[in-house]
Amino acid sequence: MTGDASEIVLSKQDLREVAAFAAACAEAVLGVFEADQPDDARPRDAIGAAWEFARGGERGKSLRDAAWAALKAAKGAETAAAREAAWAAMSAAGAAYLHPLAKATQVKHILGAGAHAARTAELVAGDDRSAGAARLEQTVRRATPAVVDVLTRFPAAPGGGGRVGELIRVLDTGLRSLTFDG
């Protein structure tokens, strides 16, 4: 096993596109966390930091700190659905840190927020997988050609990861099958 994965060219604009996609995915389920923990703004702040980066802000310590804070917020959530929503927010802020390495695990940076949002929807619906499938369909429709272009530079999503890993793979397959006119 070698540790030298080949490099993928990623521009700052590529990272901004991925962060915007991830922020939109997480924002769609933010209310689930906020209903559980109305006085905890950390997931909202993480999504806000992702949007700020996507709109031209810097990828610095405050963005990384916002991701870590959302992760800590997840630990204080009362419900599994609220935890997943906070993890979606953490993933949104973390999307800006997609590494230019040709490793399947990097796909989680691109699709993690969408997969956690889908899992949130499932849990809110009593663990109904059709709710997750519906959220994934919305996520696929939200994807821009730029996001799909970045995704297809990487290998397919890795195995494992429990239900969220399954959702990442479904989302990965769905996005890779998209074609855009023009």
Image (cartoon, grey):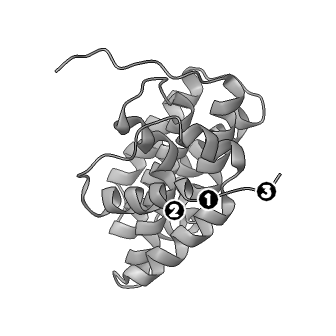
Which residue is labeled 1 in the image? Answer: 178
> Which is more toward the observer, 79 or 133?
133
Contact, CB < 8 Å: mark 2 with mark 1?
yes
Which residue is labeled 2 in the image? Answer: 174
> Which is more toward the observer, 126 or 148?
148
Q: Secondary structure at mark 2?
A: helix
**Residue 76 in view of the camera:** yes
Q: Secondary structure at mark 1?
A: loop
Number of other residues with Cα within 10 Å of mark 1, as a class: few under 14, some 14 to 19, many 20 or more: few
Asked if residue 13 is positioned above or below residue 81 in the image, the reply reads: above
Q: CA distance from mark 3 to mark 1?
A: 10 Å
The residue depicted at 58 percent of the width and 67 percent of the height is 31
Specify the label residue 11 is tagged with.
none
> Which is more toward the observer, 109 or 154?
154
| Residue 82: percent from left, percent from top | 42, 65
Which residue is labeled 3 in the image? Answer: 181
The residue depicted at 46 percent of the width and 18 percent of the height is 7
The residue depicted at 60 percent of the width and 24 percent of the height is 10
Asked if residue 67 is positioned above or below residue 130 in the image, the reply reads: above
